[in-house]
Amino acid sequence: MIDVLVVDDDFRVAEINARYVAKVPGFRVVARAHDAAQAFATVQRERIDLVLLDHYLPDETGLALVQHMRQLGHRTDVIMITAAGDVATVQDAMRLGALHYLVKPFTFSALRSRLEAYAALRRTVDRVGGSGSGIAVQEQVDRIFGALRTTTAAPAQGLPSGHSLPTTDLICGVLHRAAQPLSAYEVAAETGLSRSTAQRYLRHLEQAGRLRLTLRYGDTGRPEHRYAWVAPG
Protein backbone atom coordinates (compact mmCIF):
# COMPACT_ATOMS: atom_id res chain seq x y z
CA MET A 1 0.00 0.00 0.00
CA ILE A 2 1.29 3.45 -0.95
CA ASP A 3 0.82 5.98 1.87
CA VAL A 4 -0.10 9.49 0.72
CA LEU A 5 -0.04 12.92 2.35
CA VAL A 6 -2.45 15.42 0.76
CA VAL A 7 -1.39 19.06 1.16
CA ASP A 8 -3.74 21.90 0.21
CA ASP A 9 -4.64 25.09 2.06
CA ASP A 10 -8.28 24.71 1.01
CA PHE A 11 -9.88 22.18 3.37
CA ARG A 12 -12.59 21.31 0.83
CA VAL A 13 -10.09 20.70 -1.97
CA ALA A 14 -7.90 18.60 0.31
CA GLU A 15 -10.91 16.45 1.19
CA ILE A 16 -11.90 15.98 -2.45
CA ASN A 17 -8.33 15.10 -3.43
CA ALA A 18 -8.17 12.62 -0.57
CA ARG A 19 -11.38 10.97 -1.81
CA TYR A 20 -9.90 10.77 -5.28
CA VAL A 21 -6.81 9.03 -3.94
CA ALA A 22 -8.91 6.56 -1.95
CA LYS A 23 -10.62 5.45 -5.18
CA VAL A 24 -7.31 4.33 -6.74
CA PRO A 25 -6.36 0.75 -5.77
CA GLY A 26 -3.10 0.48 -3.86
CA PHE A 27 -3.20 4.01 -2.41
CA ARG A 28 -4.40 5.35 0.91
CA VAL A 29 -4.34 8.81 2.47
CA VAL A 30 -2.71 8.68 5.88
CA ALA A 31 -2.76 12.42 6.59
CA ARG A 32 -3.86 15.84 5.33
CA ALA A 33 -2.06 19.14 5.85
CA HIS A 34 -3.10 22.69 5.09
CA ASP A 35 0.19 24.57 5.36
CA ALA A 36 3.87 23.82 4.83
CA ALA A 37 4.75 23.58 8.52
CA GLN A 38 2.04 21.00 9.16
CA ALA A 39 3.11 19.05 6.06
CA PHE A 40 6.76 19.02 7.08
CA ALA A 41 5.91 17.88 10.61
CA THR A 42 3.86 15.03 9.14
CA VAL A 43 6.72 13.92 6.86
CA GLN A 44 9.08 13.88 9.83
CA ARG A 45 6.63 12.06 12.09
CA GLU A 46 5.15 9.44 9.75
CA ARG A 47 6.25 7.17 6.93
CA ILE A 48 4.97 8.93 3.83
CA ASP A 49 5.60 7.49 0.37
CA LEU A 50 4.06 10.28 -1.70
CA VAL A 51 3.07 13.90 -1.12
CA LEU A 52 0.37 15.47 -3.29
CA LEU A 53 1.47 19.05 -2.87
CA ASP A 54 -0.12 22.41 -3.59
CA HIS A 55 2.28 25.25 -4.39
CA TYR A 56 0.32 28.14 -2.90
CA LEU A 57 0.37 27.60 0.85
CA PRO A 58 -0.19 30.25 3.54
CA ASP A 59 3.24 30.07 5.22
CA GLU A 60 5.59 29.21 2.33
CA THR A 61 5.38 27.78 -1.17
CA GLY A 62 5.15 24.09 -1.86
CA LEU A 63 8.46 24.17 -3.72
CA ALA A 64 10.16 25.83 -0.76
CA LEU A 65 8.86 22.94 1.33
CA VAL A 66 10.28 20.41 -1.12
CA GLN A 67 13.65 22.16 -1.07
CA HIS A 68 13.64 22.11 2.74
CA MET A 69 12.78 18.41 2.74
CA ARG A 70 15.60 17.60 0.33
CA GLN A 71 18.13 19.63 2.32
CA LEU A 72 17.31 17.57 5.40
CA GLY A 73 17.56 14.28 3.53
CA HIS A 74 13.87 13.46 3.10
CA ARG A 75 13.46 11.49 -0.12
CA THR A 76 9.68 11.36 -0.05
CA ASP A 77 8.25 11.46 -3.57
CA VAL A 78 6.25 14.51 -4.63
CA ILE A 79 3.55 15.17 -7.21
CA MET A 80 2.65 18.84 -7.52
CA ILE A 81 -1.08 19.64 -7.72
CA THR A 82 -1.45 23.37 -8.11
CA ALA A 83 -2.95 26.26 -10.04
CA ALA A 84 0.58 27.59 -10.66
CA GLY A 85 1.01 27.07 -14.39
CA ASP A 86 3.91 29.42 -15.07
CA VAL A 87 6.90 27.85 -16.77
CA ALA A 88 9.38 28.99 -14.10
CA THR A 89 7.50 27.16 -11.35
CA VAL A 90 7.19 24.04 -13.49
CA GLN A 91 10.94 24.10 -14.20
CA ASP A 92 11.76 24.58 -10.52
CA ALA A 93 9.53 21.62 -9.65
CA MET A 94 11.40 19.46 -12.15
CA ARG A 95 14.78 20.55 -10.75
CA LEU A 96 13.66 19.68 -7.24
CA GLY A 97 12.59 16.22 -8.37
CA ALA A 98 8.80 16.42 -8.54
CA LEU A 99 7.66 13.30 -10.40
CA HIS A 100 4.55 14.87 -11.92
CA TYR A 101 2.96 18.28 -12.15
CA LEU A 102 -0.83 18.45 -12.37
CA VAL A 103 -2.36 21.87 -13.03
CA LYS A 104 -5.69 22.74 -11.40
CA PRO A 105 -8.43 22.30 -12.33
CA PHE A 106 -8.17 18.61 -13.12
CA THR A 107 -10.37 15.54 -13.30
CA PHE A 108 -10.26 12.36 -11.27
CA SER A 109 -9.04 10.48 -14.33
CA ALA A 110 -6.11 12.88 -14.70
CA LEU A 111 -5.02 12.32 -11.11
CA ARG A 112 -5.65 8.59 -11.35
CA SER A 113 -3.37 8.31 -14.38
CA ARG A 114 -0.54 10.04 -12.49
CA LEU A 115 -1.00 7.80 -9.47
CA GLU A 116 -1.08 4.68 -11.63
CA ALA A 117 2.09 5.84 -13.39
CA TYR A 118 3.72 6.41 -10.01
CA ALA A 119 2.74 2.93 -8.86
CA ALA A 120 4.22 1.53 -12.08
CA LEU A 121 7.44 3.41 -11.37
CA ARG A 122 7.71 1.90 -7.89
CA ARG A 123 7.12 -1.61 -9.25
CA THR A 124 9.76 -1.09 -11.94
CA VAL A 125 12.32 0.20 -9.43
CA ASP A 126 11.59 -2.72 -7.11
CA ARG A 127 12.11 -5.22 -9.93
CA VAL A 128 15.38 -3.62 -11.03
CA GLY A 129 16.58 -3.25 -7.44
CA GLY A 130 15.69 -6.87 -6.71
CA SER A 131 17.75 -8.21 -9.59
CA GLY A 132 20.70 -8.75 -7.27
CA SER A 133 23.46 -6.58 -8.71
CA GLY A 134 22.13 -3.23 -7.52
CA ILE A 135 23.35 -1.70 -10.79
CA ALA A 136 20.95 -0.90 -13.60
CA VAL A 137 21.91 -1.46 -17.22
CA GLN A 138 20.69 1.04 -19.83
CA GLU A 139 17.60 -1.00 -20.68
CA GLN A 140 16.55 -1.01 -17.04
CA VAL A 141 17.28 2.71 -16.69
CA ASP A 142 15.07 3.37 -19.72
CA ARG A 143 12.35 1.26 -18.15
CA ILE A 144 12.51 3.27 -14.91
CA PHE A 145 12.33 6.63 -16.67
CA GLY A 146 9.62 5.38 -19.00
CA ALA A 147 7.41 4.10 -16.20
CA LEU A 148 6.07 7.57 -15.43
CA ARG A 149 4.83 7.91 -19.00
CA THR A 150 3.11 4.55 -19.34
CA THR A 151 -0.38 5.58 -18.24
CA THR A 152 -0.55 9.34 -18.70
CA ALA A 153 -2.49 9.01 -21.96
CA ALA A 154 -5.16 6.80 -20.42
CA PRO A 155 -7.68 9.52 -19.41
CA ALA A 156 -8.34 10.41 -23.02
CA GLN A 157 -9.67 6.93 -23.65
CA GLY A 158 -13.45 6.67 -23.45
CA LEU A 159 -14.16 10.28 -24.38
CA PRO A 160 -16.70 10.72 -27.18
CA SER A 161 -15.44 11.67 -30.60
CA GLY A 162 -14.73 15.38 -30.77
CA HIS A 163 -14.13 15.71 -27.01
CA SER A 164 -10.69 16.56 -25.66
CA LEU A 165 -9.28 15.90 -22.19
CA PRO A 166 -8.02 19.49 -21.63
CA THR A 167 -11.47 20.91 -22.38
CA THR A 168 -13.08 18.29 -20.13
CA ASP A 169 -10.64 19.21 -17.35
CA LEU A 170 -11.36 22.91 -17.85
CA ILE A 171 -15.11 22.48 -17.53
CA CYS A 172 -14.82 20.12 -14.57
CA GLY A 173 -12.61 22.65 -12.81
CA VAL A 174 -15.16 25.43 -13.24
CA LEU A 175 -17.96 23.25 -11.85
CA HIS A 176 -15.70 21.95 -9.09
CA ARG A 177 -15.04 25.48 -7.81
CA ALA A 178 -18.56 26.80 -8.26
CA ALA A 179 -20.57 27.53 -5.12
CA GLN A 180 -23.86 26.72 -6.91
CA PRO A 181 -25.08 24.94 -10.06
CA LEU A 182 -24.17 26.68 -13.32
CA SER A 183 -25.92 26.92 -16.66
CA ALA A 184 -24.24 26.20 -19.98
CA TYR A 185 -24.17 29.95 -20.63
CA GLU A 186 -22.32 30.57 -17.34
CA VAL A 187 -19.87 27.73 -17.99
CA ALA A 188 -19.20 29.11 -21.46
CA ALA A 189 -18.53 32.57 -20.01
CA GLU A 190 -16.13 31.15 -17.41
CA THR A 191 -14.19 28.98 -19.84
CA GLY A 192 -14.25 31.06 -23.00
CA LEU A 193 -15.88 28.21 -24.92
CA SER A 194 -18.92 28.61 -27.13
CA ARG A 195 -22.27 27.86 -25.52
CA SER A 196 -22.88 24.91 -27.85
CA THR A 197 -19.50 23.39 -26.96
CA ALA A 198 -20.16 23.86 -23.26
CA GLN A 199 -23.58 22.22 -23.63
CA ARG A 200 -22.08 19.24 -25.45
CA TYR A 201 -19.49 18.61 -22.75
CA LEU A 202 -21.92 19.22 -19.91
CA ARG A 203 -24.36 16.71 -21.39
CA HIS A 204 -21.64 14.05 -21.61
CA LEU A 205 -20.37 14.70 -18.08
CA GLU A 206 -23.90 14.53 -16.70
CA GLN A 207 -24.54 11.23 -18.48
CA ALA A 208 -21.24 9.90 -17.13
CA GLY A 209 -22.41 10.68 -13.59
CA ARG A 210 -19.83 13.37 -12.93
CA LEU A 211 -22.34 16.22 -12.89
CA ARG A 212 -25.84 16.51 -11.44
CA LEU A 213 -28.51 18.13 -13.60
CA THR A 214 -31.20 20.32 -12.06
CA LEU A 215 -33.93 22.38 -13.68
CA ARG A 216 -34.74 25.98 -12.81
CA TYR A 217 -38.00 27.43 -14.12
CA GLY A 218 -38.17 31.11 -14.98
CA ASP A 219 -40.77 33.49 -16.34
CA THR A 220 -40.66 32.02 -19.84
CA GLY A 221 -41.83 28.60 -18.68
CA ARG A 222 -38.86 26.87 -20.28
CA PRO A 223 -36.64 25.24 -17.67
CA GLU A 224 -32.99 26.24 -17.53
CA HIS A 225 -30.58 23.32 -17.24
CA ARG A 226 -28.08 23.82 -14.45
CA TYR A 227 -25.16 21.56 -13.60
CA ALA A 228 -23.44 20.88 -10.29
CA TRP A 229 -20.24 19.00 -9.51
CA VAL A 230 -20.74 15.55 -8.00
CA ALA A 231 -18.15 14.92 -5.30
CA PRO A 232 -16.63 11.42 -5.39
CA GLY A 233 -18.37 9.02 -3.08
Image (cartoon, rainbow, N blue to C red):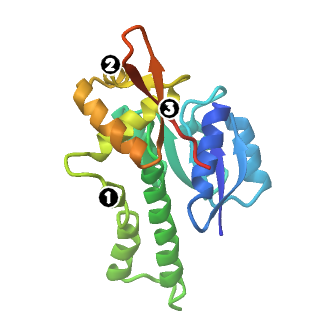
116 to the left or right of 86: right
Check contact, mark 2 vs mark 1: CB within 8 A. Answer: no
Q: Spatial distance from mark 1 to mark 3, Cα to Cα?
A: 22 Å
Nearest to the observer: residue 226 or residue 174? 226
Residue with the mark numbered 2:
189
Residue with the mark numbered 1:
158
Whether 222 is drawn above or below 105: the answer is: above
Q: Which residue type does callout 3 highlight? A: Ala
First in residue order: circle 1 vs circle 3 = 1
Residue at image location 36% in from the left, 36% down from the top? 202
Residue 101 in view (yes/no): yes
Residue extending farthest front: 221
**Closer to us: mark 1 or mark 3?**
3
Q: What x and y, as percent, mark residue 35?
A: 68, 34
Q: Spatial distance from mark 2 to mark 1, Cα to Cα?
A: 27 Å
Nearest to the observer: residue 4 or residue 127? 4
- What count of labels does the image hold? 3
Q: Which residue type does callout 2 highlight? A: Ala
- Can you tell which quarter of the image residue 169 is in? top left
Q: What x and y, as percent, mark residue 100?
A: 44, 52
Whether 147 is drawn above or below 66: the answer is: below
Residue at image location 47% in from the left, 69% down from the top? 121
Residue 71 in view (yes/no): no
Residue with the mark numbered 3:
228
Which element is circle 1 on?
Answer: loop
Q: Spatial distance from mark 2 to mark 3, Cα to Cα?
A: 16 Å
Check contact, mark 2 vs mark 3: CB within 8 A. Answer: no
Residue at image location 32% in from the left, 81% down from the top? 139
14 to the left or right of 97: right
